[in-house]
Amino acid sequence: MAGKFLLEVVTPEKQLLSQQVDEVIAPGSEGEFGVLPGHCHFLSTLRIGELRYRVDSQTHSMAILWGFAEVTPTKVTIMAEIAEQAEDIDVERATAKVAEAERRLQAGGLPSEVKDAQISLEKARLRKKIAERTKKTGHA
Amino acid sequence: MPSLQSLRRKIAAFKNTQKITKAMKMVAAAKLKRSQDRILAARPYAHKMRGVLSNLSRRVNRSAHPLLQKREVKKIEVLVITSDRGLCGGFNGNIARKSAEFVRQCEAQGLTVGLSIVGRKGRDYFRRRSWPIRQEWTGVFDKLSFEHALDIGGDLTDNFVKGTFDELHVVYNEFKSAIQQRVIVEKLFPVDAATEFSAAPAEGVASGAYLYEPDEAALLSALVPKHFQVQAYRILLESAAAEHGARMAAMDGATRNAGQLIKKVTLYYNKTRQTAITKELMDIVGGAEALK
């Protein structure tokens, strides 16, 4: 294999990650895509989902909420609206958020409110999923 | 010779001023810390975004998105970023001078120039000179948030699409360090095809080798407006941090100057007092001498 490539994750708040990795799996808006070294140039929007990256045999995970990804043969740049490392997610809070969003979805209301609730449910579920898995295995 | 009392009053007044400038310096230092953290955190994102976009604009058809259009330049817009408050040294003066100079340069080339202004100080400056101001925003920096960037960026992108102007330049203070600002004139619209970034992806990629997901149009319409919002936000943050830095430096200088003045006047006061005492003594001695 052609060795490692650089993965950079930035959000408007901060630069989250800049690291040499072996493999990246990102949540593209049209479906997940995997990147190995030497990938062709590629630009995609991202949806709410999980970003996984592998360094040697260690896999790490991160929650990504929207954004863009630029892939070049030597580098992957993820520009996310919000990104959180799995280790930083608070499980209790995520669980509470899931319950709250489900309740709001049940309550119904204006279409825009329902949509809001759906989005926050999706966000909360993702956080919960990643956080719980991290807790169980010690790493993602 | 000024009376002793008036000198005492003067010293007290300087001391009061010094207290105020010292307090302002403290406040500015605290605010600087916060805004410095924000701009340093926001920079990587904004720069990556610009890199991606200028890369992209080399490859895609310019007519693919209204914001990428390059028209013949007849009307240009200058966005001037100043602060709402004064007492920050040459901060606003430098900006105002630079933008006035820039506007004159453009007018000399036969271009029509419009002014958009952020910050009360800049507005006042151009209003006093009765230059027409197209659009102004004040009170942005009290609680600077992404909303402001959306507001300002939205207005400017709308007007660019409508054809109010063909090019947009921003004049702002870039935050270099706590004590250093740099006045920057930057072209925001239209996006230049990878000028400063041309070195990075010079692998000579044919446009066909680039994949987009979803399709190019959808991607552009998500990415391009976002880019301008992010840039507007970054510029506002730069200016806010630079402002606090400038104010801190200015107030530090003022505190030191006040200290020097206090020293000088106190010395003068003591000398005057001594002279007065000597004179009185001489009077007494002279009187006693006369009685002999």
Image: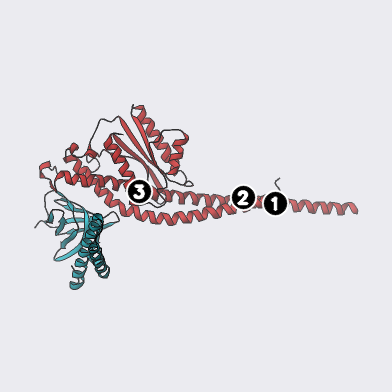
Chain colours: A cyan, B red
Q: Nearer the viewer, mark 3 or mark 2?
A: 3
Give the Cα distance between marks 3 and 2: 47 Å
> Could you tell me which quadrant the C terminus of chain B lies in?
bottom right
Q: Which mark is residue B148?
A: 3
Dot 1: element: helix
B228 vs B291, left or right, is left
**On the picture, is B223 further left or further right than B235?**
left
Query: In this rendering, do the residues under marks 3 and 2 share a single chain?
Result: yes
- The percent position of residue B149, horizontal first and vertical second, equals 33, 47
Q: Which mark is residue B5?
A: 1
Is residue B234 among the parts visible in the rendering?
A: no
- Structural crowding at the residue carrying mark 3, measured as other residues with C-alpha within 10 Å and reported as few (<14), some (14–19) or many (≥20): some
- Real-space Cα separation, disc 1 to disc 2, in angstroms: 16 Å
Can the viewer see residue B274? yes
Q: Residue at x 45, y 36 (%)?
A: B127
Q: Is residue A5 above or below residue B83?
A: below
Q: Earlier in the sequence, mark 3 or mark 2?
A: 3
